[in-house]
Amino acid sequence: MRISAVHRDRVEGLSPDTITSLTLPTGLSAGRVAVGDWVLADGAVLRRVLDRQSLLTRRAAGKADEEQLIAANLGRLAIVTACAPEFNVARLERYLTLAHAGGVAPAILLTKADTTDPTPYVEAATQVARSVPVIALNAKSPQATEQLFPWCGPGQTLGLVGSSGVGKSTLASALTGIKQATGEIRTSDGRGRHTTSSRSLIRTLVGGWLIDTPGMRELRLGDAAEALADTFDDIQELALQCRFTDCGHDSEPGCAIRAALDAGQIDPARLANWRKLQDEEAQRVATPQETRARNRAFGKAVKSALAAKRRKGGK
């Protein structure tokens, strides 16, 4: 049996011929069960969650240490974004890191390719993810589903993630044959209104599985140290060439990253996002003492900068 939905105090299990509402045993909360989990059940009671092949997680919004399960046992994670002004490279890098951290092969789907020239969006996405498939498509076109069916056939599970309004529900409808609720298209920006409210597991038309997820307003990564090395493999390779193993990649002599930046070999925005995600990871694993020390140092730096500004203004 496979988990198709997770609620506050129960879960739903999908078997070949029925959907069963399962109660949870003592000691197992719904927060520790993910859509896509394979489980053993005794009647209407879940007994055991089987070992996972992959697991997407994030840190719960507003809670530093609480892990939120997104989906389990995915073979491919399709990161959906639109060929539109809202296209965001930093957001793509964050989703790619989510996939790498969960042990899932990512792909990038660029929707609304029929509304504009998709070439610059494809080029930008390819630069961000050099070894990741990038597909520009019209989510309403039959050809779009044909391109994705190889990832959601028998024995395969495809996940969809991305911001609200980029066409995930339209893709889900095409892949499953089940009409997903989609909102009106806003004429101001051509974006659909967010309608998916919870994660769900659905059978695809070609005998596999699809996990659709709501748009994420905030994606705070969990354990991402190794995943960052995969997402930013070009920067990671340079870091290994620095003269000092503890190089801060700022003003240290022999810094290969700084040299590449000065030579125009690294996009400054990409380096800035790498630093931002590295800082988030450092804060996640920091001890309370380290966090307090970092906050004190930051406070002193701010006071110093303000004092210097006041002195300059008084001259």
Image (tube, rainbow, N blue to C red):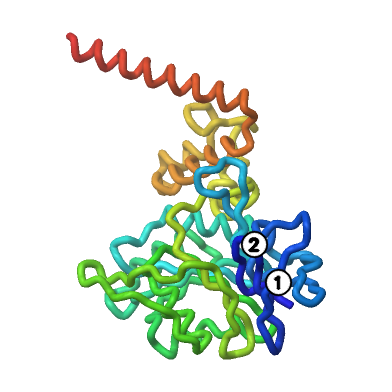
Q: Residue at x 51, y 48 (%)?
A: 61
Name the spot of residue 272 as percent of width and height, x first: 43, 42
Name the spot of residue 261 as percent of width and height, x first: 43, 41
User: For this view, does 157 lie left or right of residue 116?
Assistant: right
Name the spot of residue 9 as percent of width and height, x first: 64, 62
Name the spot of residue 128 as percent of width and height, x first: 47, 58
Q: What residue is shown with label 1? A: 22
Which image quarter holds the N terminus?
Answer: bottom right
Vertical arrangement, residue 162 with respect to residue 235, above or below: below
Q: What residue is shown with label 2? A: 9
For numbered disc 1, what is the local secondary structure?
strand
Does residue 151 appear anywhere in the picture? no
Q: Amino acid at mark 1?
A: Leu
Gap in angstroms between the C-alphas marked 2 and 1: 9 Å
Which image quarter holds the C terminus?
Answer: top left
User: For this view, does 141 lie left or right of residue 63?
Assistant: left
Q: Quadrant of residue 240?
A: top right
For numbered disc 2, what is the local secondary structure?
loop
Vertical arrangement, residue 255 with respect to residue 122, above or below: above
Vertical arrangement, residue 212 with respect to residue 219, above or below: below
Q: Give the camera-side residue of 132 and 150.
A: 150
Q: Give the camera-side residue of 103 and 159.
A: 159
Label 2, residues with CA under 10 Å away: few <14, some 14-19, many ≥20: few
CB atoms of marks 2 and 1 within 8 Å: no
Q: Residue at x 41, y 39 (%)?
A: 262
Q: Amino acid at mark 2?
A: Asp
Q: If you read the primary sequence from the N terminus, does the residue marked by circle 2 or circle 1 appear first?
A: 2
Q: How many badges with numbers are in the image?
A: 2
Q: Give the camera-side residue of 240 and 94.
A: 94
Does residue 91 appear anywhere in the picture? yes
User: For this view, does 195 lie left or right of residue 28?
Assistant: left
